[in-house]
Image (cartoon, rainbow, N blue to C red):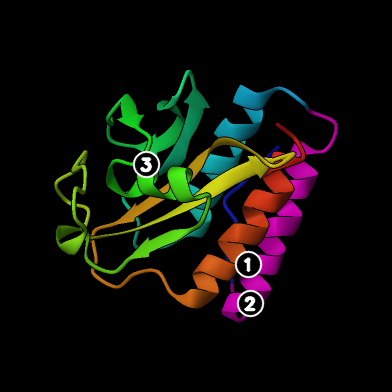
Amino acid sequence: MFHASHYSGTIEQNYELVIQQLTALLEGEQDQTANLANASALLNQFLNDINWVGFYLYKSGELVLGPFQGLPSCVRIPIGKGVCGTAAQNKQTVRVDNVHEFPGHIACDAASQSEIVVPMIKNNELVGVLDIDSPSLNRFSELDQHYLERFVQVLVRFI
């Protein structure tokens, strides 16, 4: 039914395609776990040079590990701590070129060198965050941020 896609357009065209694929994948399904699992799988096969992609969900005042692709990870992250907790607290994307220079970085995977975290906001409320790590420094650009924020905007309609 599904197969790995090969993205051969410009970065912008490829991101537009993956957002279209996300919409088609989630259309008609409202189960949060299923949709987050498929979204993480889609990003994992789309993005190159990453070692972790997944979600932390806001529950009882903290972020709790949700569906992801990668090595086992930290289960709970306090709001305001690390990159994920900071993005959640400020409800703004945090892009870090070198995680070792981020005060209070939580090292779940020692291979991670750069990170981007996009908060998931629905009806002005924090739902969780999309977290993506890379084993390379400076992996995530402004363009990645723009399209990952759009990806999350589509996703929150289905969770």
Residue beneath label 2, please? 12
Q: Nearer the viewer, residue 102 or 56?
A: 102
Q: Which residue is mark 1?
A: 15
Highlighted magenta segment, given as a residue range: 8-29
Q: Quadrant of the N terminus?
A: top right
Distance, label 2 to label 1, CA atoms, is 5 Å
Compared across the picture, whether 79 is left or right of 125 comes to left
Give the number of the mark in front: 1 or 3: 3
- Apparent side of residue 46 relative to residue 23 in the rendered image (left or right): left
Depth check, front residue: 12 or 115: 115
Name the residue nearer the viewer: 150 or 37: 150
Quadrant assignment for the C terminus: top right
Few, some or many residues within 10 Å of mark 2 (<14, 14–19, 20+): few
Q: Which residue is mark 3?
A: 85
Q: Nearer the viewer, residue 109 or 126?
A: 126
Label 2 near label 3: C-beta < 8 Å? no
Q: Could you say whether the residue bearing mark 1 is in a helix, strand or loop?
A: helix
Amino acid beneath label 2: Glu
